[in-house]
Image (cartoon, grey):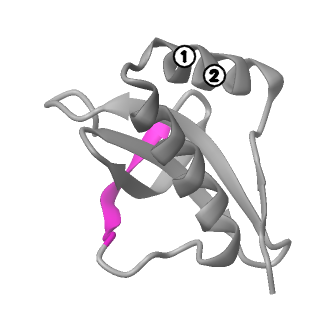
Amino acid sequence: MKYDVRFPSGSIEKRFLKALNRISPAGIRDQIKKGILGLADNPRPYGEPKIKPPVEVYEHVAQFRLRVGNYRILYDVDDKRKIVWILALRRRNERTY
């Protein structure tokens, strides 16, 4: 069964899209978009470990990450309602987690 991929609020979506639009080249942006769409079919991709300890993003908690190049998509999964909550897009560095 497919999951619905959403943002928890309009402000988080706005921040995510702003970060996405700053990324160049455009090929990386396309890979990030494909990665997000892929979470609808498989919210826990093989080889992507759970974040330990979970990371607080705004007032939400990211328990999972998806690696796309040097970027990480931080998200959470609600299995009861079949929703993947996209929380942040961050460049991989020491402040990512």
Magenta segment's dominant SS is: strand
Instruction: Count neighbours of disc 2 (C-alpha within 10 A) and say few if under 14, some if 14 to 19, many if 20 or more.
Output: few
Residue 51 forms part of the magenta stretch: yes
Q: Residue furthest right?
A: 81
In the figure, is residue 31 to the left or right of 3?
left
Outermost residue toward the left in this view: 94
State the extent of the magenta-drawn residues as a range: 48-56
The foreground one among 1 and 28 is 28
Task: Please say if 28 is above or below 55.
Answer: above
Q: For the point 77% across and 71% down, which residue is it? A: 3
Residue at 80%, 73% in the rendered image: 82
**Residue placed most toward the observer, 12 or 67:** 67
- The residue singled out by tag 2 in the image is 17
Which picture quadrant has residue 37?
bottom right
User: Quick one: SS at disc 2?
Assistant: helix
Residue 94 placement (x, y as % from top left)? 14, 31
Q: Can you identify the residue that label 1 sits on?
A: 21
The three-letter code of the residue at mark 2 reads: Leu
Q: Is residue 48 above or below residue 68?
A: below
> Is 47 situated above or below 1?
above
Residue 12 drawn in magenta = no
Secondary structure found at label 1: helix
Contact? badges 2 and 1 (CB < 8 Å):
yes
| Residue depicted at 62% across the width and 32% down the height | 59
Residue displayed at 33% across by 60% down: 51
Image quarter of residue 87: top right
**Picture coordinates of residue 44, whole percent (x, y):** 50, 75
Q: Quadrant of the N terminus?
A: bottom right
The C terminus sits in image quarter:
top left
Q: In the figure, is residue 59 to the left or right of 30?
A: right
